[in-house]
Image: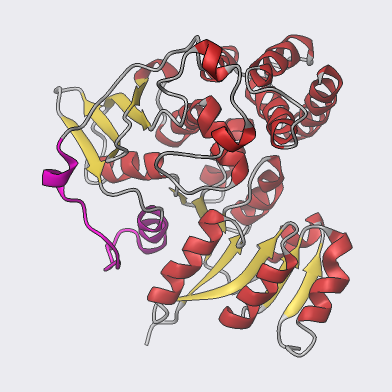
Amino acid sequence: MSKKKQIAILGSTGSIGTQALEVIEEHSDLYEVYCLTANNRVELLAQQARKFQPAAVVIANEKRYDELKSLLSDLPDIKVYAGARALDEIVEAAPIDMVLTAMVGFAGLSPTIHAIKARKAIALANKETLVVAGELILQLAQQYHTPILPVDSEHSAIFQSIVGEDQNPIEKILLTASGGPFRLKTMEEIARVTKADALRHPTWDMGAKITIDSASMMNKGFEVIEAKWLFGVDARQIQVLVHPQSIVHSAVQFQDGSVKAQLGIPDMRLPIQYAFSFPKRLPLSGDRLDLFSARKLEFFEPDLEKFRCLALAFEAIDRGGNMPCIVNAANEVVNRAFLEDRCRFLQMADVIAETMQRATFDKNPDYETYIETDAEARRIAAELL
């Protein structure tokens, strides 16, 4: 009998992490949880540990270690760790076959690098890893012969569209976006939106940070950067299409004019499962796409004046170097500030743009530069707020 694939989930209490556990539960004959991690949500992490019985759990916030240890005190076989260093070390554990990087933000970079160096297959759901340090990550993946399988619905769709195409060149990537909750609003209306408005995404159920990024379309800008690195194309070969129905998850145009797309209902379990099972397709419970009921599929160009964050992401791609790192750091600061009612919606783009002007630009950054850039950009953005 072949052994079950051992999976470490970084960020198991978030939207991607919880849905990944649903996939593992549905295919418990194939997959087993080796490790679960979270940043702060101790109670849910403990509940997950009780259900899935991993070898280890890690709480990134060291202040919550005693609480987690107490909640799992009657389960001595589950090792409990805390802190950023523990995250880096746990992904190197010998039994692990695959690491799902579902942590949100810059914090996912270091453990992803450690997992790559330990030659663990990466199911990549942390887009900031490639936004911040795409060139470095791809170099390491090649050096250590580590596969990176995309989990974002759009990048999974692109990946699924090029499977079997071997070396056929990509002419264009058609990267779809729902348009978020403010697609039809005027600038005047957007200027008055609240946190509650922005958190009401019309299609996807995501965590708060990503939902706000989707509303500002910064999330789509990050996905353009991610696609550039994942699929080896120039940013000019990536076209963003606003597709409110969220049925076409993305498409690829080849040099003969043929376009291949992946379609389906909005369900993140599908790209998660495909990353786990590739190249096989496994059964998945749930609804199926009915094109008769869908009736129409619409596509629009994004409004870069209304959604300035997307324009700033394209500017960061053009400048290269550590500029995407600067944009990511500033965005994390303003995103949190907006969620805490310390920043207006349109002010987020203003702060990011000013941070891009003030932060130290480096055309050829290394890992230490990324660390320094992230800290500097966060400081500048916080001061501007």
Q: Is residue 43 above or below residue 28?
A: above
Please tell me which residue is depicted at 73% across the width and 25% down the height of the picture: 343
The residue under the point 83% across, 80% down is 70
15 relative to 372 in the view: left or right? left
**Segment tinted magenta in the rendering:** 269-295
Asked if the magenta segment contains residue 285, the reply would be yes
Q: Who is closer to the viewer here, 110 or 177?
A: 177
Percent of width and height locating residue 378: 80, 28
Residue 300: x, y in percent?
30, 19
Q: Residue furthest left?
A: 292
Task: Let me know if residue 224 is in the magenta part.
Answer: no
Whether residue 99 is visible, yes or no, is: no
Q: Please tell me how many numbered marks the rendered image carries.
A: 0
**Residue at image x 73%, y 9%?**
357
- Residue 261 lies in what quarter of the image? top left
In the picture, the quarter occupied by the C terminus is top right
Image coordinates of residue 11 in percent, x first then y, are: 63, 57
